[in-house]
Image (spheres, grey):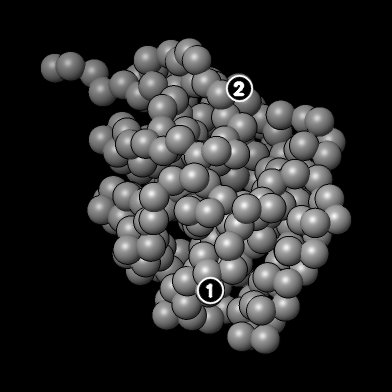
Amino acid sequence: MEILKGKIAEVFKSIQGEGIYQGVSQVFVRFFGCNLKCKFCDTKLDKYLFLGLEELLDKINTYRDYHSISITGGEPLLEINFLKVLTKKLKEEGRIIYLETNGILPRSLSEIIDYIDIVSMDFKLPSSSGEKEFWFQHREFLKVAVRKDVFVKAVISEKTLVEDIRIAMAIIKETDANLPFVLQPQNPLEDILQERIEYFEKLCLEDNINVKVIPQLHKKLSIK
Ligand code: SF4
């Protein structure tokens, strides 16, 4: 029987640099490959290893003393068959599993949601990412993700349009008004971006959205 393998770009331990779990210690399992080409992407991957489950577990098990295992990419849900086996095994071993995803593959998420503890979902705002709209996919994705601890984050650039923020806010309200909505500045806060973020934050607060402005920590600290 053929052994199921995943394309793994790297496995390492660091602290989470984004979102509401910023600062917690994690083992990162980074899958290779993505189905998007966001303008702001800072994950430049050019090689990977084809690893079977046991080989990957051996790498993960070289680390001790961390909060959770971050399954990240690229887009990890592209490798749903391998991911199902991996997350089931990690869950059986009692690990906390944190999934970092672009939030456009709801069917794949539903296949592993039982094994996931925390979902960090990106809202791909077309005006920030340069990609097409994924509102339908994001809406369907969140319907599955709300079964677990979930938050959404959106990269904000000087190009981000208020129309995109309003649609994201509406989807959040339809899903769960308490869902944390993280506004993540693309760059260190320049004046023009700061004004824009403050404006978006005010809109969210006026609409009782659970908004948080959280810049990326690992860029500030220059760590992986
Ligand atoms: S979804 Fe993430 S990994 Fe993929 S291109 Fe966009 S930022 Fe990069």
Identified at 64% across, 39% down, the residue is 26
Amino acid under disc 2: Thr
x and y, in percent, of residue 140 in the image: 32, 64
In the image, taking residue 6 as reference, residue 130 lies left or right, namely right
* The CB of the residue at mark 2 lies under 8 Å from ligand 1: no
Question: Which label was assigned to residue 166?
Answer: 1
Q: Position of residue 83 (x, y in %)?
A: 35, 37
Label at residue 62: 2
The residue at the point 57 percent across, 78 percent down is 178
Nearest the camera: 103 or 144?
A: 103
Q: Would residue 22 be visible to someone looking at this image?
A: no
Instruction: Determine the image quadrant of residue 13.
Output: top right
Image quarter hosting the N terminus: top left
Q: Using a 10 Å C-alpha cutoff, classify the residue at mark 1 as few (fewer than 14 neighbours), some (14 to 19) or many (20 or more).
A: some
Residue 210 coordinates in the image, percent (x, y): 64, 76
Residue displayed at 43% across by 68% down: 146
